Each structure stands twice: as C-alpha cells, then as structure tokens.
Image (cartoon, helix red, strand yellow):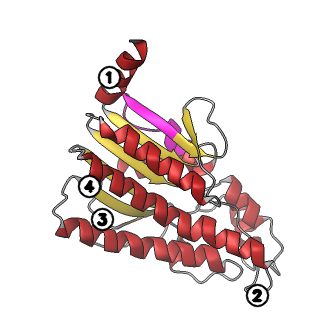
Amino acid sequence: MQNADKEDADAERGSLIWISGATEGIGLGLARNVPYGDARIINLSRRPHPHHESIFLDLADPESWDNVGAHFADSLANFRGARAIFIQNAHMKGMTGFVGEVPPDDYARDITANVAAPLRLGEMFLRAVGESGFAGEAGLVMMSSSSARSPTIGQSVYCAGKAALEMWVRVARRELAMRDRRNVWVTAVRPGFVDTPLTRHVAAMADDHYPIASQMRRQMEQGIGVMDIDSAARQIWAALPTDQSLLLFGEQVRREA
C-alpha cells in the first residue's frame, strides 16, 4: 500500500526533471538551481548524485541508453504533473587530438558517446512523451557549444557532435510543428565559457594537441568572460521554456527560429 501511495504522489508532483551528468559541471549547477519547488529531479550518470535519484547512464554504452529510455516511458506513463523536462548535458571526456592520430578505438568510442548518444537520448525522450499521451509542458534541452560553429583544431568529434545536435534540434522542431504538438518545445543551448571540470581538462592539454589550450588557460586565470556553474544554470533556467531553436549565452547574441 505504501508503494502505491508513493507512486500516486509522484504522479501528482508538478515537475519531472531529468538532467544527464548532474554530478558535476553545468549539470550540477542545473540540478541545484531547478526553479520548481515541487520537482522530482533525476540524475542520469555513471555516478550517483548525493541528493537526487539516479539512473545509470554511460554514454559509450548503448545498452544503458535503452534503460534510460525505458525509465522515460515508465515515469511518464502515469504522470499527471505540469511539466516534464529532459536536459541532455552529459559529455564524455573524449580524445582530444588530430584526426588520424588518435587511437582508433578511442576515436570510435568518442563518436558513440558524444555524437550518437545525445541524439538517441533526445529521441527517446520525445518518443516517451508522445507515446504516454502526456498533455502538460514537455521540454527538451540539448546542451551545445560555440564549437558547433567553430572548427576547433584537435576537437573534430566534439565540433561535429555539437553541429549535428543543433541541426537535429532544428529538424525536430519542424517535425513537432507539423504534428501540431504545441505542448512540446525543443532547444539547443550554447552556455558560453563556464568553469567546469571539462573546461579545465581541455585547458590543461598540450598546445600541440589542442592549440587554443593556452588561450583558455589565460582567460581562466584572468577571469575574462568566465561564468561559474550556478550563474550559468540560473541564466539557462530563466530562459526556459522557449520558442527558440538556439539560446546563446556569453557570445554575440543571435537567435534562430
């Protein structure tokens, strides 16, 4: 009886929020700045979150994607709250280096984790929303980067993945509009230069592998245009929901419908 009562209580809660990679970086900031007091927050990550429910996700392991997809479907099946939002934020630290010089197995794993996984997870969320018949606000945020438009030497997979992600968002928005699914919004977010473990990881790279590493280090040392994770998270939440396909922070303002 207690389990049934808990399921009923969860179904009635106003907000259902999934954040991949909520244990560090921008994902951590997003999790601790969720603006809905009644939210059920779920971390999708290889590491459990100390304060929130966690579902195992390994971007390099497609079987774990399927488990996340099943969790989307199960959670939305009887959900009667106001909103369901998935923020695809997780990124695997890929192999920075020149094309043809990175070990082939590592390069293939980077493609699986950072190109295929985000698109598949986004598709699974939208499928679960549609098949559940959820009538509240459904939002999908795909975290992108200025690398979607800048061919950064040493980051071929990262740049290609972010560019593909933004085009996927644009196509998905048009398809949702054709189906008249007005309760569903999808957007990509370029958060700007945020001080995260991933940013520090690539900034520490040797310049011969990643030529802009020294520039990044100088910018971080001087604090020029660098945001902390909580400030970045609050900016992102304040801009949602949105009717834009791309939200830009920390760079020249340009919006795409």
Q: CA distance from mark 2 to mark 3?
A: 37 Å
Against 145, residue 1 (above or below) is above
The crowd level at tag 4 (other Cα within 10 Å; few <14, some 14-19, many 20+) is many
Q: Is 56 placed above or below 152 here? A: above
Residue 114: image quadrant is: bottom right
Whether 57 is among the magenta residues is: no
In what element is the residue under mark 2?
A: loop
What is the distance, in whole Å, between disc 4 and disc 2 at their CAs? 41 Å
Mark closest to the chain's N terminus, 3 or 1:
1
- Where disc 1 sits, the SS reads helix
Badge number at residue 100:
2
The quarter holding residue 73 reads top left
Looking at the rendered image, the disc whose residue lies closer to the viewer, 3 or 1, is 1
Say if the magenta span includes residue 37. yes
Specify whether residue 255 is in view.
Answer: no
Q: Is residue 144 left or right of residue 138?
A: right
Q: Amino acid at mark 3?
A: Gln
Which tag, 4 or 1, sits closer to the chain's start? 1
What are the residue bounds of the magenta stretch?
A: 28-42
Confirm or deny contact between disc 4 and disc 3 (CB under 8 A).
Answer: no
Q: Which numbered circle lies on residue 244?
A: 3
Q: CA distance from mark 2 to mark 1?
A: 54 Å
Q: Is residue 20 above or below residue 205?
A: above
Separation of residues labelled 4 and 3 (CA atoms):
12 Å
Disc with the residue nearer the chain's start (4 vs 3)? 4
Residue at the (36%, 34%) spot, across then down: 36
| Residue carrying label 4 | 184
- 107 displayed left or right of 253: right
